[in-house]
């Protein structure tokens, strides 16, 4: 303490820090803490707290933007990641990046490489818009890499973050400033998002699931579903031939498509295929959900076990919209291999791994396959257009 009070070398700046590994206190308590640290002679105040919920980070931002002394404000844990990446936006004196991801000194630290290459942190400033994927879990997602690369490529002043959330409504209510301008949402929030939006794209409303939320300048939240466009255009291209996606009549028109799964992706594909004039059959583990989706779109419902023998005609299309086969359970598949030869085209919404067991077995049966990566890129392209208001000349490849 005597060092602080008088004997500090002239050119030396002193960082005095406080760590709370349990929680993030209220704004008032944080402000008091900053004042106390400043009072002991700190040139730079450092406060690190822990996030129990992603909304906790907003209190650190509020204190940082009003702080009269240089301040480092970091919220630890994966839920606090945005405090580290958005430090330059909210006036943080510095942020920490680790050199080796296996050697963190506090929970939730990104690597220097991620800060520079993924989040382009050198370009983040007070006017930078915040976009992100709110999901739980979220760290497996490739969306931050894809969206940030595209934002950098077109020079749009925004950063796209993985946002580990627990409650979509409280997240959107807390981060309600115009700078938090758009969000992708994934499991488990796609259905909750319908309630959270003030306005909806009509297709998204019929599907009952939203994967894209845009905050309009008037503050209203508008919900879209780009999964539907992403999956259907990928399947249409996979079918190919006369009547491809650019034609007036979709190559899906009149075809029989079996959609396996009745969750968010299943609904999007079933509604989309119906809209394109396909005849839709829905199979799902929970049969009641298959019935409910089939009734909503005027299709037929099946149990998963029925897929083994279901062959009303040749040349059907299969779309897996369950999580079967997804990492880490890569041995999962929704349909026995021997039944795959009933189909002309097999699409798998699962995109990690790129070649799922379903696609591998379909290829072995000589069936045309379409990877979930195609859907992933196309749904992201739709989101990017919504987030940026459509920038001419943006190409993903
Ligand atoms: P969701 O709403 O939670 O629905 C999950 C679906 O999978 C339900 O139909 C569920 O059946 C079924 N399911 C889960 N575990 C199962 C199991 N062990 N056996 C049989 N069925 C099972 O999820 P979602 O958003 O629709 O996503 C589904 C898949 O699509 C995920 O793998 C996701 O990664 C993928 N997806 C990919 C993209 C892309 O861009 N490529 C976009 C969106 C989603 P019950 O109804 O019986 O629970």
Image (cartoon, helix red, strand yellow):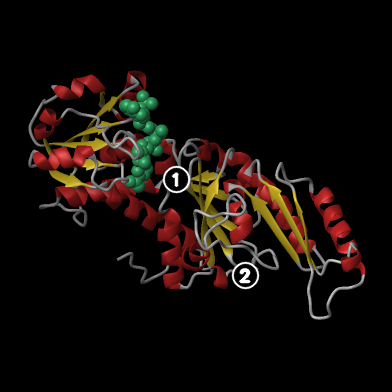
Residue in the foreground of this view, choosing between 302 and 329: 329
Residue 69 position within the rendered picture, expressed as x and y whole percent measured from the top left: 81, 68
Give the foreground label among 2 and 1: 2
Q: What residue is pinned by disc 1? A: 211
Q: Is residue 325 left or right of residue 111?
A: left
Rendered view: 218 above or below 150: above
Question: Which residue is depicted at the point 34% across and 50% down?
Answer: 376
Q: Quadrant of residue 126?
A: bottom right
Q: Quadrant of residue 180?
A: bottom right
Q: Where residue 125 is drawn, which disc sits there?
A: 2
Quadrant, the N terminus: bottom right
- The secondary structure type at the circle numbered 2 is loop
Residue in the foreground of this view, choosing between 25 and 128: 25
Residue in the foreground of this view, choosing between 6 and 376: 6
Label 2 packing within 10 angstroms: few (<14), some (14-19), many (20+): some
Disc 1, ligand 1: is the CB inside 8 Å?
yes
């Amino acid at each position: 303490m005597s060092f602080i009070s008088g004997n500090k070398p002239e050119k030396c700046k002193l960082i005095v820090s406080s760590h709370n590994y349990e929680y993030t206190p209220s704004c008032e308590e944080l402000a008091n803490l900053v004042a106390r640290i400043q009072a002991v002679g700190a040139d730079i105040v450092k406060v690190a707290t822990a996030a129990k919920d992603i909304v906790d980070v907003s209190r650190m931002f509020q204190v940082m933007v009003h702080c009269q002394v240089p301040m480092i404000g970091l919220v630890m844990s994966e839920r606090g990641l945005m405090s580290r990446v958005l430090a330059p936006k909210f006036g943080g004196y510095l942020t920490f990046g680790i050199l080796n991801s296996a050697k963190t000194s506090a929970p939730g630290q990104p690597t220097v490489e991620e800060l520079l290459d993924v989040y382009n942190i050198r370009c983040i400033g007070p006017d930078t818009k915040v976009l992100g994927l709110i999901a739980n879990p979220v760290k497996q997602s490739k969306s931050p890499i894809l969206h940030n690369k595209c934002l950098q490529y077109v020079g749009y002043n925004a950063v796209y973050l993985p946002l580990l959330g627990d409650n979509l409504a409280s997240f959107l209510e807390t981060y309600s400033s115009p700078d938090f301008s758009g969000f992708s949402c994934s499991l488990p929030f796609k259905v909750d998002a319908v309630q959270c939006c003030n306005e909806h794209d009509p297709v998204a409303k019929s599907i009952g699931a939203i994967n894209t939320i845009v905050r309009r300048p008037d503050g209203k939240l508008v919900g879209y579903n780009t999964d539907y466009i992403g999956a259907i255009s990928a399947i249409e291209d996979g079918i190919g031939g006369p009547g491809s996606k650019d034609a007036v009549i979709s190559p899906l028109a009149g075809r029989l498509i079996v959609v396996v799964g009745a969750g968010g992706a299943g609904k999007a594909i079933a509604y989309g295929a119906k809209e394109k004039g396909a005849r839709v059959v829905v199979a799902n583990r929970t049969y009641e959900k298959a019935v409910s989706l089939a009734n909503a779109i005027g299709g037929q419902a099946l149990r998963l076990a029925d897929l083994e023998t279901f062959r009303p005609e040749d040349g059907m299309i299969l779309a897996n919209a369950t999580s079967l086969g997804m990492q880490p359970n890569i041995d999962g598949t929704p349909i026995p291999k021997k039944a795959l030869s009933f189909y002309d085209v097999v699409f798998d919404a699962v995109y990690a791994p790129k070649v799922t067991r379903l696609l591998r077995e379909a290829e072995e049966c000589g069936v045309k396959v379409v990877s979930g990566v195609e859907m992933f890129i196309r749904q992201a392209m739709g989101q990017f257009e919504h987030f940026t208001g459509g920038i001419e000349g943006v190409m993903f490849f």
